[in-house]
Amino acid sequence: MDDLDRRIINNLQGGFPVSERPFLEAAQTLGIGERDLIDRLERLAEAGVLSRFGPMYHAERLGGGLTLAALAAPPERFDEVAALVNAHPEVAHNYERAHALNMWFVIATERPEDIGRVLAEISSETGLVVHDMPKLEEFFVGLRFEA
Amino acid sequence: MSTEPPIDAVDRRLIQATQAGLPLVERPYHDLAS
């Protein structure tokens, strides 16, 4: 990444224009051409710097379900368990943690009642206890990375 | 207060269509709409 890539990342983490030519508008704010912006975003996505460029939705406000879950994967099976968890399309994020519960993942479903089914499936497939950690209260949601 | 989410069937289709992100084209919303 160069400095322009960093400016692009820092500027496009919120408020992307909803207009006929949103990349043109965003590019003008950055002082670059529309094609340059699109090309750079494509390159950042191909390089894996950007995992996704698009809107984020609040699963629960859409009527869906959302929960944080954790399990203790035996070290010798960690990669196998991660692959089993990640195979579920409802798993949004999955991280290894330095803790007895060493795998934490977020599950988002179209219906709240599907959360239990997904947790049960993961438990059955991995042979491990899956701890459901549903949100009790939301204080703040905001995610921004300074590149 | 209604417990139904404030979205309709078209909203759901739009959400489904943008799960992987916006198309990186000059007119991404036009691309999605068509």
Image (cartoon, coloured by chain):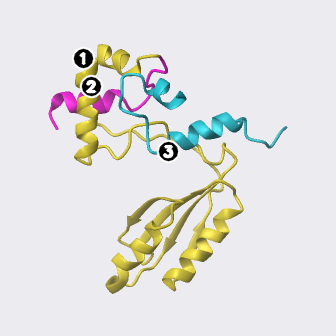
Chain colours: A yellow, B cyan
Q: Residue furthest left?
A: A2
Label 2: element kind:
helix
Judged from the image, the secondary structure of the residue bearing numbered disc 1 is loop
Please tell me which residue lies in front, A3 or A20.
A20
Q: Is residue A13 something that shows in the picture?
A: yes
Residue extent of the magenta highlight: A1-19
Is A15 inside the magenta-drawn segment?
Answer: yes
Label 2: how many Cα within 10 Å (few below 14, some 14–19, many 20+) = many
Q: Are marks 1 and 2 in contact (CB under 8 Å)?
A: yes
Q: Which mark is residue A33?
A: 1
- The image quadrant that residue A11 belongs to is top left
Chain letter of the residue carrying label 2: A
From this view, report whether residue A63 is shown above or below residue A72. above
Mark 1 and mark 2: span between their CA atoms?
6 Å
Q: Is residue A129 visible?
A: no
As shown in the figure, which amino acid type bears the numbered disc 1? Answer: Gly
Q: Is residue A121 left or right of residue A35?
A: right
Which quadrant is home to the C terminus of chain A?
top left
What residue did someone put label 2 on? A37
Q: Chain of mark 3?
A: B
The residue marked by circle 1 belongs to what chain? A
The single residue placed furthest to the front in the displayed view is: B34
Q: Based on the displayed image, in which of its 4 quarters is residue B22 positioned?
A: top left
Residue A46 is labelled as none
Give the Cα distance between marks 1 and 3.
27 Å
Q: Is residue A22 left or right of residue A67?
A: left
Residue at position x 59%, y 71% from top? A119
Kind of residue sitting beneath label 2:
Leu
Q: Position of residue A46 (x, y in %)?
A: 25, 45
In the picture, measured across the screen, residue B9 lies left or right of residue B17, that is right
Mark drawn on residue B19: 3
Query: Which image quarter is the N terminus of chain A in?
Result: top left
